[in-house]
Amino acid sequence: MAYWLLKTEPSDYSYADLEKDGRTVWDGVGNNLALKYMREVHKGDLALIYHTGDERAAIGIAEIVSEPYVDPKLADPKMVVFDVKAKKKLPKPVTLAQVKADESLSDFLLVTNSRLSAMPVSEQQWKYFSR
């Protein structure tokens, strides 16, 4: 199993929306590096759902429930999506400020390449969020 962080603008689609829907297609990613990471996702992996914008915080955990597949709305085989379902809300949001303040997370892509909307999370980084 691998771990991921998936960003979303909460006014477009929030973790609460995912809880309400139960399951959704994770789409709308256009960055080449983020798409590369999305192609590495596997069914059963877990992902932090991170709200961008004013919140800038990890809000909940989702499970990847499909392998990546070509976005059926687009005719481009490079544009992949996958299905996710809500697993659990974090007891308390973990803010970007908290992450940046922790030296053990200084190499986390959320800190070093914050523009990516999908990124891997190491086991050590995952433990920070799921403690």
Image (cartoon, rainbow, N blue to C red):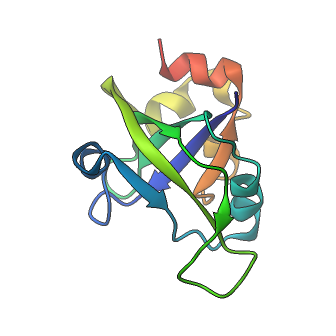
Q: Position of residue 40 (x, y in %)?
A: 76, 49
Q: Can residue 59 be seen in this view?
A: no
In the figure, 25 relative to 125: above or below? below
Examine the rendering and report whether any part of residue 67 can be seen: yes
The N terminus lies in quadrant: top right
Q: In this view, does 97 lie to the left or right of 111?
A: left
Residue lying at 32% horizontally and 60% vertically, measured from the top left = 13
Question: Quarter of the image holding residue 29?
Answer: bottom right
Query: Horizontally, is 123 left or right of 92 in the view?
Result: right
Residue drawn 48% across and 47% down?
Answer: 84
Classify residue 117 as left or right of residue 88. right
Q: Residue at (68%, 18%) from the top-left corner?
A: 124
Q: Position of residue 121 (x, y in %)?
A: 67, 34
Q: Residue furthest top?
A: 131
Q: In this view, does 9 lie above or below 91?
A: below
Residue in the image at 63% along x and 42% along y:
111
Q: Height in image: 86 above or below 82?
A: above
